[in-house]
Amino acid sequence: MSNLQLRVISAVVLAVIALGLTWLGSLPFRLLCAAMSAMIFYEWTRMSRPAVNGLSFLPEALVVVFIGALIGGLSASWLLLLVAFLTAVTAIAAQVRKTGQWEASGLAYASVSGLSLALLRDGDNSGLVAILFLFAVVWATDIFAYFVGRAIGGPKLAPSISPGKTRSGALGGAVGGVVAGVMLAAAAGAGNLALLGLVALVLSIVAQAGDLFESWVKRRHGCKDSGMLIPGHGGVMDRVDGLVAAALALYVIGWISAGADHPAQGLFPI
């Protein structure tokens, strides 16, 4: 079996699981977000943590606190305050022990990733459409960027960070993401398609930036993949790097338009 076939099979299986839990929403979806946050933090620390860890298990204990709050359905304001507090505690502890700030940044990255997705879903129809819109944009961006980049090639997008990515692939991914997002929004009955097309473009760009950011983190620590959990893809971070960046962007946009607790309702008043 070729690597592409393995990637496709893994992606389909993961998509089915993600879509099923997204449809269910509520606790099942929060559990998915919590598991994702836990795996992101594990893979981040696996790459960045030195052999001798001066913080012992403090960051892990703080991540468990966040996961409990996320699963428990804490409100957005309290979750955001909790993430800020836990990150600050980890950063201060690292400063005191002079161990660097990778633990604190990993805790913030993992927590905000799960928080953004969980609060976007929000248990109602608007939240369901918001997550499906996010999936459509990010997945189409990945697919079109891969195949357009392979077909056209050309100048590299960021050769020092991710040598395989091309500018043609980035442009193709952006076009594919916008088309997929608008089609999903139209099928869901959303009326503000021009605005959502612009949002889809922003999400596609942010998703590609998130992919590059994770590539930079891996290169910074001399790792090819963040893990080996997903056949053909590597780790969880390798699979969701663009998704979590775009989820944060969509959450912020929704927060501005409708508030922190019900961000999807401002964009998808369905």
Image (spheres, rainbow, N blue to C red):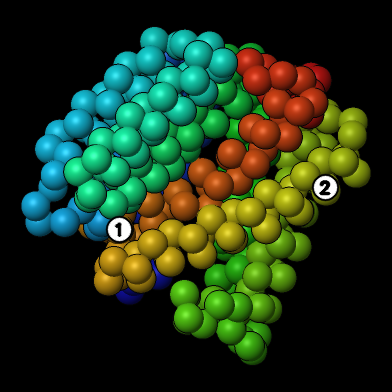
Q: Residue reaching furthest bottom?
A: 154
Q: Is residue 248 visible?
A: yes
User: Left of 185 or right of it: where is 30?
Assistant: left
Q: Quadrant of residue 193?
A: top right
Residue 130 screen position, x and y as percent: 67, 31
Helix, strand or loop at label 2? It is helix
| Residue under numbered circle 2 | 197
Q: Position of residue 178 (x, y in %)?
A: 76, 53
All told, the count of numbered labels is 2
Task: Tell me residue 202's x, y (percent).
Answer: 73, 51
Give the mark toward the camera: 2 or 1: 1
In this view, which residue lies farthest toward the left? 52
- Residue type, label 1: Ser
Amino acid type, label 2: Gly
**Which residue lies at the image location 83% right of the left edge and 48% below the top edge?**
198
Quarter of the image for the C terminus: give it. top right
Rendering quarter of residue 209: bottom right
* Residue located 41% across and 24% down the image: 85
Q: In the drawing, does residue 242 fall left or right of residue 35? A: right
CA neighbours of label 2 inside 10 A, class few (<14), some (14 to 19), many (20+): many
**Image point 55% across, 47% down: which residue?**
245
Residue bearing the label numbered 1: 226
Q: Secondary structure at mark 1?
A: loop
Q: Is residue 97 left or right of residue 178?
A: left
Query: Where residue 178 is drawn, which disc sits there?
Result: none
Q: Examine the rendered structure and indicate whether residue 141 appears above or below residue 186.
A: below
Q: Residue at x 71, y 70 (%)?
A: 171
Q: Nearer the viewer, residue 69 or 103?
A: 103
Q: CA distance from mark 2 to mark 1?
A: 32 Å
Relative depth, front residue between 153 and 57: 57
